[in-house]
Image: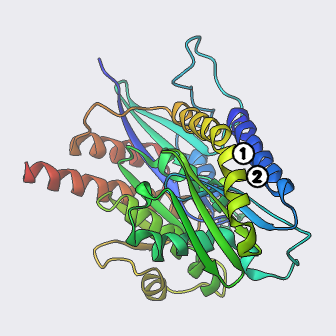
Amino acid sequence: MNSDIQRIINEVRSSAEEIISESPDQIRAVYIMDREGTVITYVTNTILINAGNTFFAAPPRFISSLKGGLVSTLPIGDVNYILMQGVDGIIQLMNIRDAGYIMVIINSEASIGLIRIILEKYTDRLYDLLRKLLSVSEEEVIEVINVEITPKDIEDVINFIKSKAVM
Amino acid sequence: MPIKTIKIVIAGPYGAGKTTFVKTLSEVLPIETDVPIMKSSIDGKKSTTVAFDYGRMKVREDLVVHLFGIPGQERFSFMWKIIARGMHGYLFIVDSSSEERVKEALGMYNFFRENFPSTPHVVAANKQDVPTAVDIPTIKSILKVPYEVKVMPLIATNRRSALFVLVTLLEEIRSYLIEMSRLR
Ligand SMILES: Nc1nc2c(ncn2[C@@H]2O[C@H](COP(=O)(O)OP(=O)(O)OP(=O)(O)O)[C@@H](O)[C@H]2O)c(=O)[nH]1
Ligand SMILES: [Mg+2]
């Protein structure tokens, strides 16, 4: 893994850890996602969640089902804030502007307002990190393919392979 | 003379055999497996650690094939799309040593199908040397592979098998390009 990317992911992760530490008796888990809803990092609160809980053990799959089920019916890009009652707690999902999403699972209704304020406090920092992550990964992955490939080019590759390889 | 680049992506979940596949090919083909040059580097500096497998094969002075193996772990899934952007075709490798492993590949396969609906691809059922290996029709049905997409048996450690799958993918890309030029 490229060290820049790794460093940014680590910073995203420490932000998620800090969010939990702001209200450790309320926040069960924090997920930071990119704008497609793919999980970049997640942190679970080990004090509130026992190790055997499968719901929290498989968060990426959970997120994809969330995306597939609930969010695909809404235009996720335009959603700023979602509040949902789940089996394992209350889900608060907030848009980090156009860069991604932050999602937390909390214990009780009473803390919704407080948690929202905490999340808002972190959006600027997470926005910067997600933007950086996006630009670093895009720079890394080279090749703007602009010259058109023809069937003849592919044929040349196939013939090249057949001539080089001792089948 | 502009250099043409053919970009091929080797996809598949964690432990499917992507690295093995690229490694086996590089034993029989003149594939350089050094790290890619960053677009951003003005001084031509090369990065030393990369998150994906990478190989380059020069076919003509003006024609190069790039192979990208994506990181299979789900925690890197935000990179899948970035790496796959602009690819001409992809090989989707699944570990076919058990039905369980094939089922695990469904999410990632759907991800590629959804995000790259018209990109030519071939599904490779790897580890067919394992006695418990799942047969091709079963894989087709578990992954809901469209009938026009080929599912090929693969033993990524075997040179002949790896070459055959690569050539099949290239033939698919070629047919697709012919089709596209007809439509124009
Ligand atoms: N029996 C058998 N084992 C294989 C074959 N191909 C790969 N393996 C083994 O499967 C394991 C995983 O192979 P890798 O090539 O590392 O898998 P990968 O897809 O690159 O995995 P990630 O990079 O972690 O996503 C290794 O132990 C390989 O030796 C095969 O054709 N047959
Ligand atoms: Mg690998």
Q: Mark 2 points at which residue?
A: A16
The number of numbered badges drawn on the structure is 2
Please say whether residue B21 is visible from this viewpoint: no
Q: Report crowding for label 1: few under 14, some 14 to 19, many 20 or more residues within 10 A (C-alpha).
A: many
Image location of residue B165, percent across then percent down: 45, 62
Question: Residue B30 appears at what percent x and percent y?
Answer: 53, 38
User: Residue B34 lies in what quarter of the image?
Assistant: top right
Residue at the top extreme, as displayed: B43
Say whether residue B68 is left or right of residue A52.
left
Tell me where residue B132 appears, x and y as whole percent. 65, 88
Residue A45 placed where, x, y %? 85, 66
The residue tagged with tag 2: helix, strand or loop?
helix
Parent chain of label 2: A
Tell me how far mark 2 sits from mark 1, CA to CA.
6 Å
Mark carried by residue A12: 1
Name the element at disc 1: helix
Residue type at the position of mark 1: Val
Relative depth, front residue between A139 and B44: A139
Residue placed at 78% from the left, 53% from the top?
A: A19
> Which chain does the numbered disc 1 sit on?
A
Amino acid tagged 2: Ala
